[in-house]
Image (cartoon, helix red, strand yellow):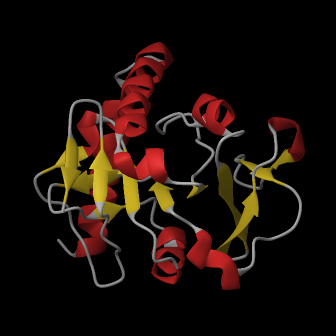
């Protein structure tokens, strides 16, 4: 089985595991992950955070972004053709639904020339391993964006998304830290 087939199989396995939990359970798991993230020095010291506005099957970031939105500047990715561009999060009211059904901020694009102002990147994913590898949904959006940003990359995920090894290829980007419900994995 080649890497693409192994990734597809793992994505299906993780989706199946997620479906075995209720939305309430996943929300409780999300709160555990976010509470752990909030305790990290990386998050506490960050002033500009590139995060993501979660979809229903991801660690929920909505309340967390709102909670810290006055103390920190949040940037959120917006799908623009095959790339992610960044926009400032202002409020939930200043967002619109994308073609993927993800809420995205409206307004000006955060310039690439200012990516060095980003202190921390919070990354979603489908599966991760103990070597800090990440597997996304298969479109490569984050794999193309992350090399442009020097800030530490921190993945947030549920415990059941961590594996000893996941299939990776050359384009896949490693994380600096992974935060899940009961564990923090660092380089």
Q: Does residue 155 appear to the left or right of 170 in the view shown? A: right
Q: Compared with residue 162, is residue 176 higher up or lower down, i.e. above or below?
A: below
Q: Does residue 166 appear to the left or right of 97 in the view shown? A: left
Which residue sits at x=49%, y=19%? 23
Which residue sits at x=74%, y=78%? 111
Q: Can you give x and y, in whole percent of width and height, for residue 62 in the image? A: 63, 34
Quadrant housing the C terminus: bottom left
Q: Can you give x and y, in whole percent of width and height, for residue 87 in the image? A: 76, 62
Please name whichever residue, 157 or 140, is drawn nearer the observer in this view of the structure: 157
Residue 82 in sight from this viewpoint: no
Point out the residue furthest to the left here: 164
Q: Can you give x and y, in whole percent of width and height, for residue 156 in the image? A: 39, 45
Which residue sits at x=46%, y=56%? 123
Q: Can you give x and y, in whole percent of width and height, for residue 33 in the image? A: 37, 32
Q: Compared with residue 80, is residue 121 higher up or lower down, i.e. above or below?
A: above
Please name whichever residue, 94 or 113, is drawn nearer the observer in this view of the structure: 113
Q: Compared with residue 172, is residue 96 higher up or lower down, i.e. above or below?
A: above
Which residue sits at x=66%, y=52%? 74
Quadrant housing the N terminus: bottom left
Q: How many marks?
A: 0
């Amino acid at each position: 089985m080649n890497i693409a087939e192994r990734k597809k199989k793992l994505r299906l396995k993780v989706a199946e595991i997620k479906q075995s939990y209720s939305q309430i359970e996943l929300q409780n798991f999300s709160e555990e992950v976010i509470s752990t993230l909030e305790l990290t020095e990386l998050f506490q010291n960050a002033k500009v955070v590139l995060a993501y506005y979660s979809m229903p099957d991801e660690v929920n970031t909505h309340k967390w972004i709102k909670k810290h939105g006055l103390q920190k500047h949040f940037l959120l990715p917006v799908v623009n053709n095959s790339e992610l561009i960044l926009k400032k999060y202002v409020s939930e009211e200043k967002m619109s639904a994308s073609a993927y059904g993800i809420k995205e901020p409206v307004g000006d694009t955060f310039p690439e020339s200012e990516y060095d102002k980003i202190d921390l990147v919070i990354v979603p994913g489908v599966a991760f391993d103990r070597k800090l590898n990440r597997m996304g949904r298969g479109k490569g959006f984050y794999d193309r964006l992350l090399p442009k940003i020097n800030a530490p990359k921190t993945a947030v995920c549920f415990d059941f998304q961590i594996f000893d090894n996941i299939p990776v290829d050359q384009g896949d980007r490693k994380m600096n830290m992974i935060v899940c419900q009961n564990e923090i994995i660092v380089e």
